[in-house]
Every structure is written in structure tokens, then in C-alpha cells.
């Protein structure tokens, strides 16, 4: 098996193992994150209906213009995305969520994102 394919298989196994223990409902949706080298995405998902309730990403921040022209780190962006998603969730009447970290370790950008979501009032 090629090295890249092997890494993808390992990653999908880790994600499946994490996902097997988590289910989102309308009252407490699943908070799924996706991390790339450049961007960060998050969404609240109702697994009973199979619908995305709220989503936020690096694109919704507006780049450096939103931060006053100052360059921000990836962790700072993730924190801001967490705050944004938390505010959107509050507007929809969602106060709690189940966190789905997929195949990522709970540190760095992922932890920063959760801290931002908690700061905005979302219970995880």
C-alpha cells in the first residue's frame, strides 16, 4: 500500500472510531470540525434529519480586513470562528452541542476553536 493511501486509511479509521460514539440531535447537535493547512471549517449537524443547522469557516471571517489589517495566526482565526459559530447557534436557539473532533488531536487550532465556542456561550 502506498504511503499516502495508508495515511488516509488510518485517518478515516480514527474519524470513524470517534464518530461511532457521537450522535447529534436537534436539541444537542454534533459540532464537526474540518481542518486544512490553510482553512478551518465547523458546522452544527442534526444527525436525525441529516441537516446542517449552522456553519462557519475561515471564509466567513473576511480575512485581514476583519482583524483591522493585522495578520492573525491560525489559532487566533480558529478562536474567532468558534465565537462566530457560537453566536450563530445562540441566534438559532442552540445552547449545547456534542463535539466531534474527527481524526484530529484536541490541541492547537481545534482546542482554540472550542475555547472560542465556549466563550460565546455554547456548552460543549
Image (cartoon, helix red, strand yellow):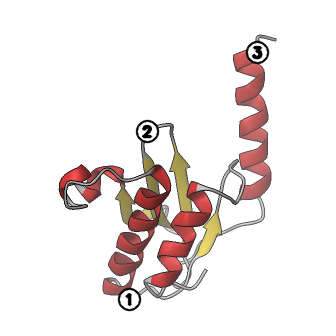
Please report whichever mark, 2 or 3, sits nearer to the chain's N-terminal start: 3
Residue 4 at x, y percent in the picture: 70, 18
Q: Quadrant of the N terminus?
A: top right
Front disc: 2 or 1: 2
Front disc: 2 or 3: 2
Q: Does residue 17 appear in the picture of this structure?
A: yes
Q: Does residue 53 appear in the picture of this structure?
A: no
Name above or below for residue 6 compared with residue 70: above
Q: In what element is the residue under mark 2? A: loop
Q: Is residue 45 left or right of residue 65?
A: right
* Residue corresponding to mark 1: 93
Q: Which mark is residue 38?
A: 2
Please identify the residue farthest to the top as the structure is shown: 2
* Residue corresponding to mark 3: 3
Q: Is residue 122 left or right of residue 18?
A: left
Q: Local crowd at mark 3 within 10 Å, few (<14), some, or many (≥20)?
A: few
Amino acid at each position: 500500500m502506498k504511503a499516502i493511501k495508508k495515511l488516509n486509511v488510518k485517518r478515516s479509521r480514527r474519524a470513524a472510531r470517534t464518530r461511532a460514539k457521537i450522535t447529534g440531535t436537534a436539541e444537542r447537535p454534533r459540532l464537526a470540525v474540518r481542518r486544512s493547512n490553510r482553512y478551518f471549517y465547523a458546522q452544527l449537524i442534526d444527525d436525525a434529519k441529516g441537516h446542517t443547522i449552522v456553519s462557519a469557516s475561515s471564509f466567513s471571517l473576511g480575512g485581514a480586513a476583519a482583524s483591522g489589517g493585522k495578520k492573525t495566526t491560525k489559532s487566533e482565526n480558529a478562536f474567532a470562528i468558534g465565537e462566530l459559530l457560537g453566536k450563530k447557534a445562540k441566534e438559532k436557539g442552540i445552547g449545547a452541542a456534542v463535539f466531534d473532533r474527527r481524526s484530529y488531536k484536541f490541541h492547537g487550532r481545534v482546542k482554540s476553536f472550542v475555547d472560542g465556542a465556549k466563550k460565546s456561550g455554547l456548552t460543549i
